[in-house]
Image: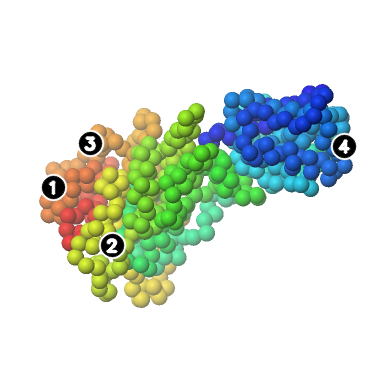
Amino acid sequence: MLAKTFGGAVYGVNASIITIEVVVAQGLHFHLVGLPDSAVKESEQRVEASLKFFGYRMPRQKVVVNLAPADIRKEGSSYDLPIGLCVLQASEQIATTRSLEDYVIMGELSLDGTLRPIKGVLPIAIEARKQGYKGFVLPTENAQEAAIVNNLDVIGVKTIQDAVEFFEGKKDIEPLVSDTRDLFLSQINAYEVDFSHVQGQENIKRAMEIAAAGGHNVIMIGPPGAGKTMLAKRLPSILPPLSLQEALETTKIHSVAGKLGTRAALIATRPYRSPHHTISDAALVGGGSFPQPGEISLAHNGVLFLDELPEFKRSALEVMRQPLEDRKVSISRAKWAVEFPASFMLIASMNPCPCGYYNHPEKECVCGPGVVQKYLAKISGPLLDRIDLHVEVTPVSFDQMTANRPAEPSEVIRERVIKARERQTARFADQPGIYSNAMMPSQMVKEVCTISDAGRALLRTAMERLGLSARAYDRILKVSRTIADLAGSEEIKIEHLAEAIQYRSLDRENWAG
């Protein structure tokens, strides 16, 4: 007898529906076909133990399990539950009143028949609704995540016995319903940190506000303990809130990577990722023999913070150059290619030298001649070229640290950022793929960032006297356009240019002396 149901396989951040067929016929042995990996092949042992635990049996006949289409590789242990149910139906141990073919079924079985949570639930649920399936049967721990998708009955089960009783009609399990919009709105401002906790550092806060308003990448240079990491952690709290579409995109990526947790549903706040400097190329950008999203994709629609930038492997930093430009990463293998979105703000920090105290107001640098320049040279010019703001961070004095003056909260700064972003949205309305000043190509910079003769003279003087490099020119104009947007000005004024010029520390030829 033949039994059939459906599961899902995730490729990149999208899913494909997989047909699971089981036939029990005369003969011996269990055969699993359809390009399964080792984890799928091992399902025979997990399924047999689970069935025995609840008093069922694995047929002592020829059992053929087919996962179609056969040319797509199937990975992981999430096909255990549909295989187990199909084996029971095909061997006539259960008589179903609800059709297995109306549902997408996924879940990993323990040896006692309980279900473990799986990865990639959200993309599979979206595909199941798109293809018109009645419902999605899956582990209870994943039900909240799948319930984000409306018009799909999400049935959470704890054991294979619960699933059997549901399909036999002996147990009614109410579909889990989640009001996605209410859930999203209730968590949209749920940040644990706030700029109101930061005493002093007003100039750095201002640079962060400009970066958030224009989507600019930032590098902070300063001694240990100056507050670089603390400030970077607070940046997501002043970025514009995620739209519902952005939240779904972000949640899909975290679902595929298995980073959502068992009780999480929709990611409503902008992600903040801070990988260690020992990270491999594949972990940072994505990849592996079965490609998974890397840190840059997990930071999609949020912030990627690279602490101690010169300590990262040069190869890891260089593979990040293309995603910074294209805002996506393509990973190609011999038979297929996947694409992960990677639209993030890069925030980097570094010490000014190996000892950390070059240019420190109180402590003396002990690095030898040329060491500072060699340390800075670890960051390649093309990568530095993609960073708009260079900010020098100085330590906070004792008086500033102990002052009880209330600092400006993130909510107030965010309001100014949102208004600046609204001006940019209107400006780039007829430019597909451009949403902020940081995304402008060089040709558009000339059209959008026009400056007066006085401004041109100031820029020429700054470039000559400060020894700014040619690549600084476009960056200064982009940043000054953002400063003008924050000020509500249609034109770039001389004071906007003057402020933008000071954010090019590393372009000064004499910076490292």
What label does residue 268 carry, if any? none
- Check disc 1 and report its element: helix, strand or loop: helix
Residue picked out by circle 4: 170
- Who comes first in sequence, dot 1 or dot 4? 4
What numbered label is drawn on residue 352? 2
Instruction: Report crowding for label 1: few under 14, some 14 to 19, many 20 or more residues within 10 A (C-alpha).
Output: few
Task: Give how far apart the Cα atoms at labels 1 and 4 are.
Answer: 81 Å
Three-letter amino acid code of the residue under disc 4: Lys
Which label sits on residue 460? Answer: 1
Residue 413 is situated, as x and y percent measured from the top left of the image, at: 41, 55
Q: Amino acid at mark 2?
A: Pro
Quadrant assignment for the C terminus: bottom left
Disc 3/disc 2 C-alpha distance (Å): 33 Å
C-alpha separation, residue under disc 2 versus residue under disc 1: 27 Å
Q: Hey, what amino acid is under mark 3? A: Lys
For residue 446, which numbered disc appears in the image? 3
1 vs 4, front mark = 4
| Foreground label between 4 and 3 | 4
Q: Which label's residue is closer to the chain start, 3 or 2?
A: 2
Residue at the (42%, 41%) spot, across then down: 343
Distance, label 2 to label 4, CA atoms, is: 69 Å
Q: Is residue 186 left or right of residue 171?
A: left
N-terminal label among 3 and 1: 3
Residue drawn at x 25%, y 71% is: 366
